Amino acid sequence: VIRHLLEVLRRLASHPLGTGFAREGGAAPDRSPYLALAAAGGDADAFDAIFRAYHARLTGIAASMLSDRGTAEEITQDVMLEFWRRRE
């Protein structure tokens, strides 16, 4: 599950926000066209934007795979942490 969600997150974060990938809460697209690149450079604000934009979607995917919302939340947190650790 974690490997699958990491791949989903990589694909989502490699697209500009606002081009078919709605941000959570309906927020306007971020100024940075490719947040994954900025996050890879250690930009904590870019990572925060990725987290806010995709956390709910990843949790939903994990919940549908696991049928357990609590475990899905924990796994999504692990995925986000691993995404940050692998930014380089």
Image: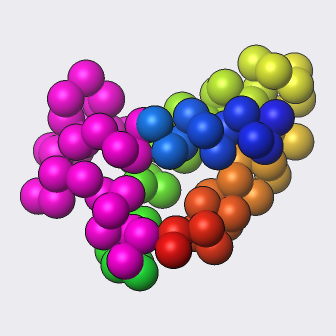
Quadrant in the picture for residue 14: top left
- Say how the picture is coloured: rainbow
Total marks placed: 0
Identify which residue is drawn at 11% across, 58% down: 31
Identify which residue is drawn at 46% across, 36% down: 11
Answer with left or right where residue 66 lies relative to residue 50: right
- The percent coordinates of residue 9 (x first, y second) are 53, 42
Identify which residue is drawn at 32% across, 62% down: 37
Quadrant in the picture for residue 8: top right
82 w.r.t. 26: above or below: below
Q: Is residue 56 visible?
A: no
- The percent coordinates of residue 55 (x first, y second) are 54, 46
- Judged from this view, the residue extending furthest toward the front is 88
Does residue 23 belong to the magenta stretch? yes
Identify which residue is drawn at 42% across, 70% down: 40
Quadrant in the picture for residue 69: top right
Quadrant holding the N terminus: top right
- The percent coordinates of residue 65 (x first, y second) are 81, 21
**Nearer to me, 20 or 28:** 20
- Residues in magenta? 12-41
- Judged from this view, the residue extending furthest toward the left is 31
Does residue 17 belong to the magenta stretch? yes
69 w.r.t. 37: above or below: above
Q: Main secondary structure of the magenta part?
A: loop
Answer with left or right where residue 33 lies relative to residue 57: left
Q: Is residue 66 visible?
A: yes
Answer with left or right where residue 86 lies relative to residue 45: right
